Image (cartoon, rainbow, N blue to C red):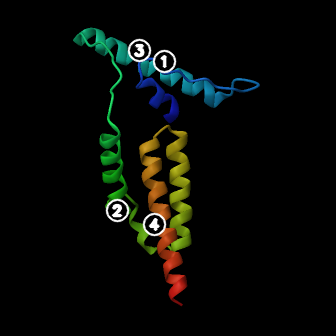
Protein backbone atom coordinates (compact mmCIF):
# COMPACT_ATOMS: atom_id res chain seq x y z
CA UNK A 1 0.00 0.00 0.00
CA UNK A 2 2.73 2.44 0.93
CA UNK A 3 4.75 1.64 -2.19
CA UNK A 4 1.67 2.12 -4.35
CA UNK A 5 1.02 5.43 -2.62
CA UNK A 6 4.57 6.58 -3.37
CA UNK A 7 4.19 5.63 -7.03
CA UNK A 8 0.90 7.54 -7.17
CA UNK A 9 2.76 10.74 -6.34
CA UNK A 10 4.46 10.58 -9.70
CA UNK A 11 2.35 11.53 -12.71
CA UNK A 12 3.58 8.53 -14.70
CA UNK A 13 4.01 6.21 -11.70
CA UNK A 14 2.89 2.62 -12.04
CA UNK A 15 2.65 -0.33 -9.68
CA UNK A 16 3.13 -3.81 -11.09
CA UNK A 17 2.23 -6.71 -8.82
CA UNK A 18 3.40 -10.22 -9.55
CA UNK A 19 1.47 -13.14 -8.09
CA UNK A 20 -0.07 -16.44 -9.06
CA UNK A 21 -3.43 -15.23 -7.79
CA UNK A 22 -4.95 -12.00 -6.52
CA UNK A 23 -5.03 -12.17 -2.72
CA UNK A 24 -7.53 -10.48 -0.41
CA UNK A 25 -4.87 -7.99 0.70
CA UNK A 26 -4.14 -7.11 -2.94
CA UNK A 27 -7.87 -6.60 -3.58
CA UNK A 28 -8.09 -4.31 -0.51
CA UNK A 29 -5.07 -2.32 -1.66
CA UNK A 30 -6.42 -1.91 -5.20
CA UNK A 31 -9.85 -0.93 -3.87
CA UNK A 32 -8.36 1.60 -1.43
CA UNK A 33 -6.09 3.03 -4.14
CA UNK A 34 -9.05 3.46 -6.49
CA UNK A 35 -11.10 5.10 -3.70
CA UNK A 36 -8.30 7.57 -2.95
CA UNK A 37 -7.75 8.21 -6.66
CA UNK A 38 -11.45 9.12 -7.12
CA UNK A 39 -11.32 11.53 -4.17
CA UNK A 40 -8.13 13.16 -5.46
CA UNK A 41 -9.47 13.41 -9.02
CA UNK A 42 -12.69 15.07 -7.80
CA UNK A 43 -10.72 17.51 -5.63
CA UNK A 44 -8.34 18.39 -8.47
CA UNK A 45 -11.22 18.92 -10.89
CA UNK A 46 -13.15 21.08 -8.42
CA UNK A 47 -10.11 23.29 -7.73
CA UNK A 48 -8.68 23.38 -11.26
CA UNK A 49 -5.50 21.52 -10.32
CA UNK A 50 -3.40 19.73 -12.92
CA UNK A 51 -1.23 17.09 -11.25
CA UNK A 52 2.50 17.31 -11.87
CA UNK A 53 5.49 15.48 -10.45
CA UNK A 54 7.55 17.40 -7.92
CA UNK A 55 11.23 17.61 -8.74
CA UNK A 56 13.77 18.03 -5.95
CA UNK A 57 17.50 18.51 -6.11
CA UNK A 58 19.82 16.02 -4.47
CA UNK A 59 20.58 18.62 -1.77
CA UNK A 60 16.87 19.09 -0.98
CA UNK A 61 16.39 15.35 -0.61
CA UNK A 62 19.46 14.98 1.62
CA UNK A 63 18.39 17.92 3.78
CA UNK A 64 14.92 16.42 4.33
CA UNK A 65 16.43 13.02 5.13
CA UNK A 66 18.94 14.55 7.53
CA UNK A 67 16.13 16.23 9.49
CA UNK A 68 14.08 13.03 9.65
CA UNK A 69 17.10 10.98 10.76
CA UNK A 70 17.93 13.46 13.54
CA UNK A 71 14.50 13.17 15.21
CA UNK A 72 14.90 11.08 18.36
CA UNK A 73 12.46 8.22 18.82
CA UNK A 74 11.64 9.55 22.30
CA UNK A 75 9.71 12.40 20.67
CA UNK A 76 7.09 9.94 19.46
CA UNK A 77 3.98 10.15 21.59
CA UNK A 78 1.59 7.24 21.92
CA UNK A 79 -1.66 7.05 23.83
CA UNK A 80 -1.19 4.07 26.10
CA UNK A 81 -3.57 2.52 28.65
CA UNK A 82 -3.02 3.31 32.34
CA UNK A 83 -1.81 -0.23 33.11
CA UNK A 84 1.00 0.02 30.54
CA UNK A 85 3.50 1.51 33.01
CA UNK A 86 3.01 -1.47 35.35
CA UNK A 87 3.99 -4.05 32.69
CA UNK A 88 7.40 -5.64 32.38
CA UNK A 89 9.48 -4.56 29.40
CA UNK A 90 8.75 -7.84 27.60
CA UNK A 91 5.01 -7.46 28.25
CA UNK A 92 5.15 -3.87 26.97
CA UNK A 93 6.84 -5.09 23.78
CA UNK A 94 4.23 -7.85 23.36
CA UNK A 95 1.40 -5.38 23.91
CA UNK A 96 2.85 -2.90 21.42
CA UNK A 97 3.44 -5.66 18.84
CA UNK A 98 -0.21 -6.63 19.10
CA UNK A 99 -1.28 -2.99 18.72
CA UNK A 100 1.11 -2.53 15.76
CA UNK A 101 -0.32 -5.56 13.92
CA UNK A 102 -3.86 -4.34 14.58
CA UNK A 103 -3.01 -0.87 13.25
CA UNK A 104 -1.47 -2.38 10.11
CA UNK A 105 -4.52 -4.61 9.59
CA UNK A 106 -6.66 -1.45 9.81
CA UNK A 107 -4.39 0.24 7.22
CA UNK A 108 -3.25 2.76 9.87
CA UNK A 109 0.37 2.65 8.78
CA UNK A 110 1.51 5.84 10.48
CA UNK A 111 0.27 4.53 13.83
CA UNK A 112 1.87 1.15 13.12
CA UNK A 113 5.19 2.88 12.38
CA UNK A 114 5.03 4.84 15.64
CA UNK A 115 4.39 1.62 17.54
CA UNK A 116 7.27 -0.07 15.70
CA UNK A 117 9.59 2.77 16.70
CA UNK A 118 8.47 2.51 20.33
CA UNK A 119 9.15 -1.23 20.26
CA UNK A 120 12.66 -0.56 18.90
CA UNK A 121 13.24 1.95 21.70
CA UNK A 122 12.11 -0.50 24.39
CA UNK A 123 14.30 -3.27 22.94
CA UNK A 124 17.31 -0.93 22.83
CA UNK A 125 16.72 0.16 26.43
CA UNK A 126 16.42 -3.46 27.57
CA UNK A 127 19.62 -4.39 25.75
CA UNK A 128 21.43 -1.44 27.34
CA UNK A 129 20.27 -2.51 30.83
CA UNK A 130 21.42 -6.10 30.19
CA UNK A 131 24.84 -4.96 29.01
CA UNK A 132 25.38 -2.92 32.19
CA UNK A 133 24.98 -6.01 34.40
Q: Which residue is mark 4?
A: 121
Q: Are marks 4 and 2 in contact (CB under 8 Å)?
A: no
Task: Judge whether residue 84 can be spotted in this image.
Answer: yes
Task: State which tag comes first along the sequence, 2 or 3.
Answer: 3
Within 10 Å of the Cα at label 4, are there few (<14), some (14-19), or many (20+) other Cα atoms? some
Of label 1 and label 2, which has the lower sequence position?
A: 1
Label 4, label 2: how far apart the Cα atoms are: 10 Å
Say what secondary structure mark 1 lies in. helix
Residue at disc 4, secondary structure: helix
Q: Are marks 1 and 4 in contact (CB under 8 Å)?
A: no
Q: Which residue is mark 2?
A: 72
Find the distance from the CA under tag 3 to the CA under tag 4. 39 Å
Query: What secondary structure is marked by label 3?
Result: helix
Label 1 Cα neighbours within 10 Å, binned few <14 / some 14-19 / many ≥20: few
Q: Of the residues tagged 2 and 3, which is closer to the observer?
A: 2
According to the picture, the residue beneath numbered tag 3 turns out to be 38
- The residue at the point 37 percent across, 17 percent down is 39
Q: In the picture provided, is 132 more to the left or to the right than 85?
A: right
Gap in angstroms between the C-alphas marked 1 and 4: 36 Å
Q: Which mark identifies residue 34?
A: 1
Q: CA distance from mark 3 to mark 1?
A: 6 Å
Q: Is residue 77 visible?
A: no
- Looking at the image, residue 27 lies above or below residue 108: above
As drawn, 122 above or below 26 = below
> Which residue, as the protein is rendered here, is positioned at the far front?
58
Residue 61 on image: x %, y %:
34, 41
Residue 93: % across, % down: 53, 65
Residue closest to the eye, 24 or 46: 46
Please identify, in this view, whether the residue under mark 1 or under mark 2 is nearer the observer: 2
Disc nearer the start of the sequence (4/2):
2
- 41 versus 118 height, above or below: above
Amino acid sequence: MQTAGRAARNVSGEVIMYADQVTDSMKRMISETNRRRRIQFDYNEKHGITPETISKTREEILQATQFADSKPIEEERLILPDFFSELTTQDKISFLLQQMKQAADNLEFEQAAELRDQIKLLKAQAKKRRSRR
